[in-house]
Image: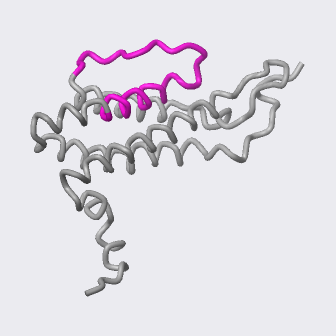
Amino acid sequence: METADSTESMRHVPPAAELLRRVDEIYRKRLDAALAIYETASEDQRKKLAARLIAVARWLERIPESPRENRAGHRGESNDPPTRTRAALQIAVEALHRIDTDRFGHRAPFHRFEQSGAERLYEAVLAAGYSLSILLDEMQKIDPDVWWKLLDSSARDQIPMVG
């Protein structure tokens, strides 16, 4: 029988270091911008945005649980959407730091007929990013320049200004 260590690596799953960079740097920067806007929003706007924040938190909570077979569910101590989302991001980053890079990205043995843990983790990272993009699109109704503010100053300098 085939073992997980003897399987080839999957080219469609990026290395663990790239996933860590994406979550720790890019998603953290986007989440900080979204939460800054959330804090300045009115109570009605917060109620609408809370569901989007919870969706981001749920996907971030799946990242550390993706390599495992079962999900423990929400482990946060707070149901406050910003607090829960920040905690989920921190737990996801800590889990990505603990990944064994030698075994990460190998497919599951054929006789198990299932996805590898790396595929489930990559799926959760992509879904968290998509959910965060939807959240920022909603935030754009409050602050129209939210995406512009997320660009680095060097990237902003390269965009030609029309006018």
Which residue appears at 56% of the width and 13% of the height? Answer: 70
Relative height, residue 101 to residue 91 (above, below): below
65 or 40, which lies in front?
40
Percent coordinates x, y for residue 142 in the rendering: 18, 51
Q: Position of residue 45 (x, y in %)?
A: 17, 39
Is residue 136 depicted above or below 89 in this figure? below
Q: Residue at x 25, y 31 (%)?
A: 50
Quarter occupied by the N terminus: top right
**Residues drawn in magenta:** 52-79
Q: Quick check: 104 above or below 2?
A: below
**Does the magenta segment cover residue 54?**
yes
Viewport quadrant of the C terminus = bottom left
Is-magenta flag for residue 84? no
Q: Nearer the viewer, residue 64 or 103?
A: 64
How many numbered badges does the structure rendering display? 0
Please identify the dominant SS of the magenta region.
loop
Asked which quadrant contains residue 132, the reply is top left
